[in-house]
C-alpha cells in the first residue's frame, strides 16, 4: 500500500516512478483500529512529494490520501497531527477543523493480540438509528472535542457514552469488559479505537495511567499495552544518509 500511494503521488505530479526499495519500520499493527492503512497511504504520498522536492502541497496530500482511503477520518490527523474533525463536502472534498488536546491528559493503548476485521466491525452495526440516539450522539461528540481541548476528564467520561458503534463492536472484543473494568478501577475512561480491537484509556493522572498499564499487562500478558503521546506535528520527512529519502 505504501508503494501504491508512492505511485499515485508520482502520477499526480506527472513524474516517472523511480526504482525504489522501501524499508518499513513501524509499530502500528494492522486490523487493530489504529489506522494502519492511513499510515501507509500518507507515507507513500509524502515520500513521492519529497522525492520531487516537496511538490505536493498539504491540501493536495489531504485530497489524494482521502481518495485512496475513501474518507478523511484517519488520513487527516496522520497528515496534520492533533485532533481533527473532518468530513466530505458536497463536492466530495475533505473539510477539516483542528482542535488542541490538553497536555493534562494521559492516554493508554490496550492492543490485544487478536484482530477485528473492518468488514466484521461494519457488518455488526445497525443500518439505522433513532432520532433520539442521533441527537445523543451529536451532542456528546460536540462536547468531547471541547473536553479534550481543555482536559475536562469528567466531561470526557460523560461524552464517551456512545450509542452508535461501541455497544455493537464491544461484542467482537472478548476481553472488552475486563479491560474496561481495569481502566475504570484506576480512574480511566475507555473507548474502542476505530473498529477495534484496540481500546484506549484516558486519564488526567499519570500515576493512574501507570497503574492501568501495569494491571492490564498483568491481566493480558500477550497484549501490547503502552502509554501514548499526542502527536501534534503530523507527517514529517528527512533526508537519509543512505538513500534518497527517509520517511517517518
Image (spheres, rainbow, N blue to C red):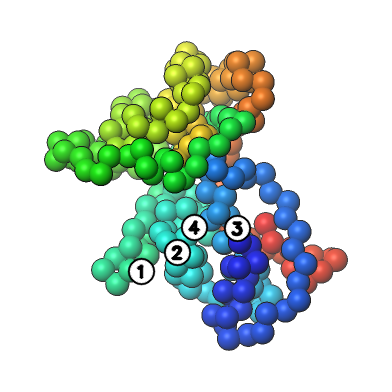
Q: Mark 4 or mark 2, which has the lower sequence index?
A: 2
- The structure residue drawn at horizontal position 40% and vertical position 33%, both measured from the top left corner, is 169
Residue 93 disc label = 1
The reply to whether callout 2 and callout 1 are in contact (CB within 8 Å) is yes
- Residue located beneath label 3 in the image: 40
| Circle 2 residue | 66
Q: From the image, which quarter does the C terminus lie in?
A: bottom right
Task: Tell me the SS state at disc 2.
Answer: helix
Q: Where in the figure is residue 64, as x and y percent of width and height?
A: 48, 70
Secondary structure of the residue carrying tag 4 is helix
The first of marks 4 and 3 along the sequence is 3
Crowding around mark 3 (Cα neighbors within 10 Å: few <14, some 14 to 19, many 20+) is many
> Dividing the image into 4 quarters, which one contains the N terminus?
bottom right
Residue tagged 4: 75
* Measured Cα–Cα span from mark 1 to mark 3: 21 Å
- For the point 46% across and 16% down, the residue is 181
The residue mark sitting in front, 1 or 3, is 3
Q: Using residue 223 as the reference point, say whether residue 81 is left or right of it.
A: left
Q: Is residue 186 shown left or right of residue 50?
A: left
Q: Say if 190 sits above or below 246 in the image.
A: above
Percent of width and height locating residue 120: 43, 41
Crowding around mark 1 (Cα neighbors within 10 Å: few <14, some 14 to 19, many 20+) is some
- The image shows residue 209 at horizontal and vertical percentages of 56, 23
Sequence order check: which comes first, mark 2 or mark 3?
A: 3
Q: CA distance from mark 4 to mark 1?
A: 13 Å
| Observer-nearest of 210 and 61 | 61
Decide: marks 4, 2 in contact (CB < 8 A)?
Answer: yes
Amino acid at each position: 500500500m505504501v508503494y501504491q500511494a508512492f505511485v499515485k503521488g508520482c502520477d499526480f505530479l506527472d513524474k516517472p516512478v523511480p526504482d525504489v526499495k522501501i524499508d518499513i519500520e513501524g509499530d502500528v499493527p494492522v486490523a487493530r483500529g489504529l489506522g494502519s492503512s492511513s499510515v501507509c497511504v500518507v507515507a507513500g504520498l509524502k515520500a513521492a512529494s519529497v522525492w520531487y522536492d516537496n511538490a505536493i502541497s498539504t491540501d493536495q496530500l489531504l485530497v489524494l490520501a482521502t481518495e485512496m482511503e475513501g474518507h478523511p477520518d484517519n488520513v487527516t490527523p496522520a497528515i496534520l497531527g492533533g485532533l481533527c474533525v473532518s468530513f466530505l463536502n458536497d463536492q466530495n472534498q475533505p473539510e477539516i477543523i483542528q482542535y488542541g488536546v490538553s497536555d493534562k491528559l494521559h492516554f493508554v493503548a490496550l492492543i490485544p493480540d487478536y484482530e477485528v476485521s473492518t468488514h466484521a466491525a461494519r457488518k455488526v452495526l445497525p443500518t439505522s438509528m433513532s432520532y433520539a440516539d442521533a441527537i445523543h450522539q451529536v451532542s456528546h461528540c460536540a462536547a468531547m472535542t471541547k473536553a479534550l481541548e481543555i482536559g475536562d476528564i469528567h466531561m470526557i467520561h460523560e461524552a464517551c457514552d456512545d450509542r452508535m458503534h461501541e455497544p455493537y463492536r464491544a461484542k467482537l472484543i472478548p476481553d472488552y469488559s475486563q479491560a474496561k473494568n481495569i481502566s475504570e478501577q484506576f480512574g480511566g475512561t475507555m473507548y474502542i479505537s476505530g473498529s477495534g480491537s484496540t481500546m484506549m484509556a484516558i486519564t488526567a493522572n499519570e500515576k493512574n495511567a501507570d497503574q492501568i498499564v501495569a494491571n492490564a499487562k498483568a491481566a493480558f500478558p500477550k497484549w501490547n499495552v503502552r502509554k501514548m503521546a499526542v502527536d501534534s506535528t503530523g507527517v514529517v520527512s528527512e533526508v537519509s544518509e543512505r538513500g534518497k529519502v527517509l520517511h517517518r
